Image (tube, rainbow, N blue to C red):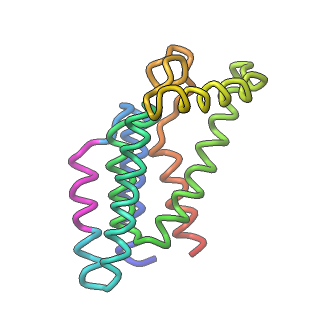
C-alpha cells in the first residue's frame, strides 16, 4: 500500500467514524482532502479525471441534497473522494458504496417489518418526481419520522476500501 492510498483510506475512515457517531461530515475534513487530491493528481497526472470525478460527485450530491436524500457533508465527501481517487476508482467506490448502502437499507426495512412496502414507497417517490419535480417527497425524505436513514460515509468508506483493494 502506498502512502497516498493510506491517506485516502484514512480520510474515508475518518468521515465514516464522524458520520456514524455525530451524523455529520465536517467541512474541515472534506475540503482540505479534496484540495490535496487535486494537487496530488496535478503532480502525478490525471488532474482532468480527478477534477471530473470531483465535479460529478458534487453535482450528484447536490441533487440528492435537494431531494432531501443526502446531507451536505455527504455531497462534499463525494466530491472529495472524486478528487482523491480520480475518475476510475471513484466510480468503483461509488458503485460498491451504493451497494453497501442498499444492503443496509434493506436490512433496516426488514428489521422494521417494512420490506413489503418497498415497492409502494418507491412508486410514491417516482410519482412525486412527476408531480413536484426534484422537490423532496413529504413522506419519503430524511425529515420524515419513518425515514430509513444510515450514515452514507460508512457505506462510501466500504466502497472506497473495496475499490482500492480490488483495483
On the image, which quarter does residue 43 sit in? bottom left
- Tell me if residue 1 comes above or below residue 65 in the rendering: below
Q: Nearer the viewer, residue 44 or 50?
A: 50
Q: Position of residue 65 (x, y in %)?
A: 38, 37
Position of the C terminus, as image quadrant, is bottom right
Residue at x-position 28% and y-position 52%: 30
In the rendered image, residue 16, in percent from the top left (x then y), is placed at 43, 45
The rendered magenta stretch, by its main secondary structure, is classed as helix
- Asked if residue 98 is positioned above or below residue 145 in the image, the reply reads below
47 vs 136, left or right, is left
Q: Residue at x 66, y 25 (%)?
A: 121
Q: Is residue 49 left or right of residue 164?
A: left
In this view, the residue in front, 89 or 20, is 89
Image side of residue 15 versus residue 166, left or right: left
Q: Farthest residue in the right direction?
A: 116
What residue appears at the point 63 percent right and 38 percent down from the top-left corner? Answer: 104
Q: Position of residue 68 (x, y in %)?
A: 43, 30
Q: Quadrant of residue 153?
A: top left
Question: What span is colored magenta in the figure?
Answer: 26-36
Q: Quadrant of residue 35?
A: bottom left
Q: Is 24 covered by the magenta stretch?
A: no
Q: Is residue 52 left or right of residue 131?
A: left
Q: Please, is residue 20 above or below residue 160 in the view?
A: above
Residue 128, above or below 134:
above
Q: Is residue 34 magenta-colored?
A: yes
Amino acid at each position: 500500500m502506498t502512502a497516498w492510498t493510506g491517506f485516502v483510506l484514512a480520510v474515508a475512515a475518518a468521515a465514516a467514524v464522524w458520520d456514524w457517531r455525530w451524523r455529520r461530515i465536517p467541512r474541515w475534513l472534506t475540503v482540505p482532502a479534496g484540495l490535496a487530491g487535486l494537487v496530488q493528481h496535478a503532480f502525478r497526472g490525471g488532474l482532468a479525471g480527478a477534477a471530473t470525478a470531483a465535479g460529478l460527485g458534487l453535482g450528484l450530491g447536490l441533487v440528492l441534497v435537494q431531494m432531501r436524500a443526502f446531507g451536505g457533508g455527504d455531497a462534499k465527501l463525494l466530491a472529495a473522494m472524486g478528487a482523491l481517487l480520480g475518475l476510475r476508482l471513484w466510480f468503483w467506490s461509488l458503485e460498491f458504496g451504493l451497494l453497501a448502502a442498499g444492503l443496509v437499507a434493506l436490512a433496516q426495512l426488514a428489521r422494521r417489518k417494512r420490506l413489503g412496502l418497498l415497492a409502494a414507497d418507491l412508486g410514491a417517490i417516482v410519482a412525486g418526481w412527476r408531480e413536484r419535480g426534484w422537490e423532496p417527497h413529504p413522506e419519503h425524505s430524511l425529515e420524515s419520522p419513518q425515514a430509513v436513514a444510515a450514515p452514507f460515509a460508512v457505506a462510501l468508506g466500504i466502497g472506497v476500501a473495496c475499490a482500492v483493494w480490488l483495483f
